Amino acid sequence: MQLLLDALQETLTLECTVSYPEHEARPGGLAAYRALAGGRSGPAMLGVPLYHDAAPVGALLIERGGDGPSTGPFAAPTRELIEQIALAAAPLIALRREAASTALQRVRRTGRERLGALLGSGRPARAVALFLVTLLLVLAVVVPVERSVVAEAELVPQQRRWVMAPIDGFVEEVSVTAGEAVVAGQLLARFDRRDLDLELARRGGEIDGAESELRAAMAVHDRKATAVARARLRREQAGQALIVQRIERSELRAPMDGTIISGDPSRISGVPVARGDTLFEIAPVEGYDVHLLVDETDIAHVRIGQSGALALRSAPDERLGLSVRTIHPVGESGGGTTRFRVRADLQARTDAPLRPGQSGTVRLQAGHERIVTRLWRPLGRRLQELRWRFFG
């Protein structure tokens, strides 16, 4: 059997019809045929390769010998007839082999054929491109990358001071504008105090009259009149002290060093204000929290103490380290989405001045994942939502 297989393989290697011993003088000497003959002088052999769609599917080998009439090499008409038979049998053998193969074998064979057609020897660029694509796919499946939770962020001062109107009246002068830096005790605004000055002068006259009345009652030793005059004097002095206090409070001064983050001079200058109205808002120069708005699909990957980095829009090349401090338990709806407010502490300082309300983007470290997982996550989440909605 092995000798037969070697002879058939030699026929396929030569890629032509082989007649033994007529073609024994070919290069290589038909070693497999000679071994199959085994030194016998009688047998004659004819080998024909079988091709289907320009691809070899097998080989046909016919041997004859003995003392009968059909001895000696095959004649030309006989060879032509056998070649015609081989030509007709090759497609049948190919179909039979295809039917006998498993589905996996057919897929592999089809893949090799398509790949060979695609990456023929004349298409090196395609081969390189396919290699690169395959390499990228392997890296996407195997190589892990850092996973990040990305959220919009805003700088919020840790403390604020509101400067409110201490009295009812008109704002006569405003000395600062929004965005201006102030120091503790600096004059911010002044109320119109003309009515208070008139009231203070009137109180002064009332006090002088009460003092004269008290001295006259004491001169005549009238105890009752003295007590009444003394009570009146005290009342007028208390009213004067109240007016003086209101005059002092008519000047608004900064309670601390910081920046005016709200307060429009054109809005409050020369207009009446009521006691308790907010006129200015002051934020400290340092001491800011970072408020993140994390989408509800990512809030499960945020935890207290988690570290990350902030890139402000005003300085996108600089990264400010931060750490999550608190997570608000109630979401905020808006724009068709629900987001959760997360507060974080800045861990690093920057030379650039920070201002309240500055916005940027935060990336929180949330472990590692493969690239293919990151690419598949949005689509996978959407498919799960649809499956739950329609099928439960």
Image: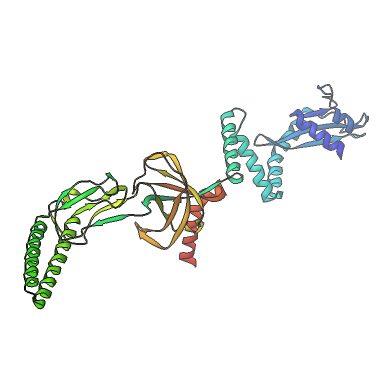
Position of 356 with respect to 362 (left or right) is left
Question: Between 214 and 186, which is closer to the camera in this rendering?
Answer: 214
Question: Between 193 and 168, which is closer to the camera in this rendering?
Answer: 193
Q: Residue at x 45, y 59 (%)?
A: 327
Residue 42: percent from the left, percent from the top? 91, 30
Residue 153: percent from the left, percent from the top? 40, 50
Position of 334 with respect to 190 (left or right) is right
Picture quadrant where residue 24 is located: top right
Residue 319: percent from the left, percent from the top? 45, 42
Question: Between 377 and 208, which is closer to the camera in this rendering?
Answer: 208
Residue 97: percent from the left, percent from the top? 71, 46
**The N terminus lies in which quarter of the figure?**
top right
Q: Residue at x 52, y 51 (%)?
A: 376
Position of 325 with respect to 10 (left or right) is left
Q: How is the image coloured?
A: rainbow
Q: Residue at x 84, y 24 (%)?
A: 29
Q: Is residue 30 above or below residue 219?
A: above
Does the image show residue 265?
A: yes
Count all numbered tags in the image, as a single digit.
0
